[in-house]
Image (cartoon, rainbow, N blue to C red):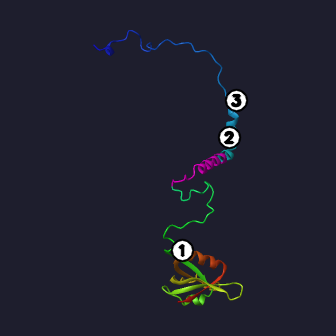
Amino acid sequence: MSRSAVPSPLPPGTEAPPACEVPHFAPVRVRGAHRQLHRLVRHRRRAVAAGLAVTAAALVAAGPQPGAGASDTRQTRGHPATEPVRERHGTSTRPVAAPVRIADAATVRLLSPGDRVDIVAAGDGGTGDASVIARGVRVTKVPEPVDGTTADGALVVVSVPRATAHRLAGAGATARLAVTLC
């Protein structure tokens, strides 16, 4: 017979060692915990705001590490870049579509997609000063006016390099633009 098959002479439950005496001690109580919990529940918005502030601080501190995909390691984490954004190699020469508002709407009606034009910025001082912003650019689209009015000029879309598109946007904000057919 195996040893596990031999019945134990003791009744079940008596195989445990005898109980030892545990000394008596007063219960442990944390002072003020009950009030702090009630205060936290009452001021739930403050607790959420504090949690969000701590989370935001942790995210800023753990922001992009140099060499971990950050394009500019000189940036201070958590603050926007103060330097202009550098374009990727080869993107400044690739043409982009640039919408340009031409002051004379009748001139725009003469244009059609595929035409080559020079875009000229006229000075506001009434001195007749004008400067050519873009030379020989291709017209890609001449959209119809939305509301039918042409008092503010008309829109034309041209295909230009990205740097020229930036100059056109800046000139359009400060001067009246005109086109000449090439």
Instruction: Please report whichever mark, 2 or 1, sits nearer to the chain's N-terminal start.
Output: 2
Q: Is the Cβ of the residue at disc 2 closer than 8 Å to that at disc 1?
A: no
Residue 21 in the image: state x and y as whole percent.
56, 12
Please indicate whether residue 139 sits to the left or right of residue 23 in the image: left
Residue 152 in the image: state x and y as whole percent.
64, 83
Q: In this view of the protein, which residue sits in the foreground, 158 or 65?
A: 65
Residue 24 in the image: state x and y as whole percent.
62, 16
Q: Which residue is mark 3?
A: 31
How far apart are the two marked residues, 2 and 3, measured between alpha carbons? 16 Å
Residue 181 in the image: state x and y as whole percent.
54, 90
Q: Residue at x 63, y 57 (%)?
A: 79
Q: In this view of the protein, which residue sits in the foreground, 175 or 110?
A: 175
Q: Which residue is mark 1?
A: 162
* Residue 133 inside the magenta-drawn segment: no
Q: Main secondary structure of the magenta part?
A: helix
The correct choice, above or below, for 81 with respect to 171 in the image is: above
Q: Which residue is mark 2?
A: 40
Please indicate whether residue 33 sits to the left or right of residue 16 in the image: right
Q: Residue at x 55, y 77 (%)?
A: 98
The correct choice, above or below, for 65 with respect to 84 in the image is: above
Kind of residue at disc 3 = Arg
Q: Which residues are magenta?
A: 49-68
